[in-house]
Image (cartoon, rainbow, N blue to C red):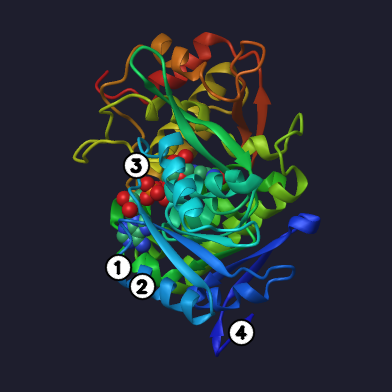
Amino acid sequence: MTVGGREFHRIGVELGPRSYDVIVGSGALEQLAELRRLPGSRPGSALLVADRGVPTSHRARAAAVLTGAGLRLHTLSITPSEEHKSLAGAEDILIAMSDHQLERGDLLVALGGGIVGDIAGFAAASYRRGISWVQCPTTLLSMVDASVGGKTGVNLFAGPKRELRKNMIGAFHQPRLVLADLDVLGSLPDRHFRAALSECLKHGLIGAEWGDPDLFGWTQHQGQAIIDRDPAVLAALIARNVALKARIVAADEREEAEQSGRALLNLGHTFAHALESIPGLAPPDSPAPLQHGEAVALGLVAAVGTAAAAGYCPAELAELVRTPLEQFGLPTRISGLPTARALIARMMHDKKVAGGRVRLILPTELGHARIFCDVPSEAIEAGIDAIRAGV
Ligand SMILES: NC(=O)c1ccc[n+]([C@@H]2O[C@H](COP(=O)([O-])OP(=O)(O)OC[C@H]3O[C@@H](n4cnc5c(N)ncnc54)[C@H](O)[C@@H]3O)[C@@H](O)[C@H]2O)c1
């Protein structure tokens, strides 16, 4: 679509009365001006929940567009860390909404990466039993994945050492609009930019099931242009990943399908969430903590290693997955891992555990994956050993 002489990709997330658009392109944030014209929406006030790490210029631009649209604007800055992605972090937002007397018809606008989107969306789902919200993702990972689909939530800190239990508390609460403005990616550090590419490859690994069998190969083929942040290639990358996720979410919004539904998007994530719960883990030459996308890269290698060891997929798939992850500079091995048994014990805290058994999403061939409930523990151990450095 074209607005004001600029070209945008517009992808619809088709969910009946909860349908919404994802707009991708340079200058997309300007469309915050249209918020008061969304059907059934007459917000008077808005709370802009902004990621402290996003440069002031982007935050100021979003604020100026919102006030220009006639909204009474309040702002709150959030520290984007997994520690702060907690009930206490969500409470700060709830208190701000209450202090500013936001009503049910008012609006929350989240401007930031996946962490800010998840906490702010959870606060929007909870405040007065749910108010409308808009996502303005500012990291590549939140553009290609986290901002779409309405999963919101926070981590739980529990156990004797108050260990991190990832995304244990949450709600499904779809945004009214998602604006992915390519201009904000200019300031995103390289490490955070690359971290997103594991989620893109994950989408490629299930692409054949969801109407884009070429996504994995295309992403690999465009590797250098992606790393160079070529604007046209980036826009296509985001639009294609959003379109794939939108199709999956439209088919299985609340992850209820027994097989082949939204759960496939968790490929690699049971391993990744366990890795993220280990304090101090980091790739070589990078400070801790491990970024979510980095943990997903390791999780994908562990998942394909498990599948190969169990005989669920051809052994060659392991190399096929490792190669583009390394090409994107993502970790595929890590030192400092606990024993495989200790990591499996952490995996038991995953939301996917059912009837006391870990349910793993594992690839079966390029483009396809399945849910497995009875994976032999030796195969899981082999998968974990595939990411262990220094052996
Ligand atoms: N809800 C979902 O469906 C879903 C899907 C995938 C991931 N997630 C969640 O998303 C989180 C990870 O999100 P993320 O990878 O975006 O990381 P993040 O939110 O931690 O952001 C990474 C860093 O980039 C900074 N940053 C953000 N935008 C910037 C910009 N434009 N310029 C400069 N710096 C910027 C942030 O301040 C932060 O330091 C995890 O908590 C993960 O669980 C949620």
Question: Of marks 3 and 1, which one's residue comes earlier in the chain?
Answer: 1
Badge 4 crowding class, 10 Å Cα cut-off, few under 14, some 14 to 19, many 20 or more, is few
Q: Is mark 4 on a helix, strand or loop?
A: strand
Relative image position of residue 21 (x, y in whole percent): 66, 65
Q: Which of 94 and 360 is in front in this view?
A: 94
The answer to whether 303 appears left or right of 16 in the picture is left
Report the quarter where the N terminus lies. Answer: bottom right
Question: Of marks 4 and 3, which one's residue comes earlier in the chain?
Answer: 4
Badge 2 crowding class, 10 Å Cα cut-off, few under 14, some 14 to 19, many 20 or more, is few
Question: Of marks 1 and 4, which one's residue comes earlier in the chain?
Answer: 4
Residue drawn where x is 45% and y is 31% of the image:
272
- Residue type, mark 4 in image: Thr
Circle 2 residue: 60
Which quadrant of the structure image shows residue 356?
top right
Work out whether 158 lies above or below 15.
above
Q: What element carries label 3?
A: loop
Circle 3 residue: 81
Relative image position of residue 203 (x, y in whole percent): 57, 47
The answer to whether 262 appears left or right of 96 in the picture is right
- Does residue 166 appear in this view? yes
- Residue type, mark 1 in image: Thr
- Does residue 212 appear in this view? no
Badge 1 crowding class, 10 Å Cα cut-off, few under 14, some 14 to 19, many 20 or more, is few
Cα–Cα gap, marks 1 and 2: 6 Å
Nearer to us: label 4 or label 2: 2
Q: Are the residues tagged 1 and 2 within 8 Å (C-beta)?
A: yes
Circle 4 residue: 2
- Residue type, mark 3 in image: Ser
Relative image position of residue 59 (x, y in whole percent): 37, 68
- Residue type, mark 2 in image: Ala
Nearer to us: label 3 or label 2: 2
Q: Does the residue labelled 3 lie within 8 Å of ligand 1?
A: yes
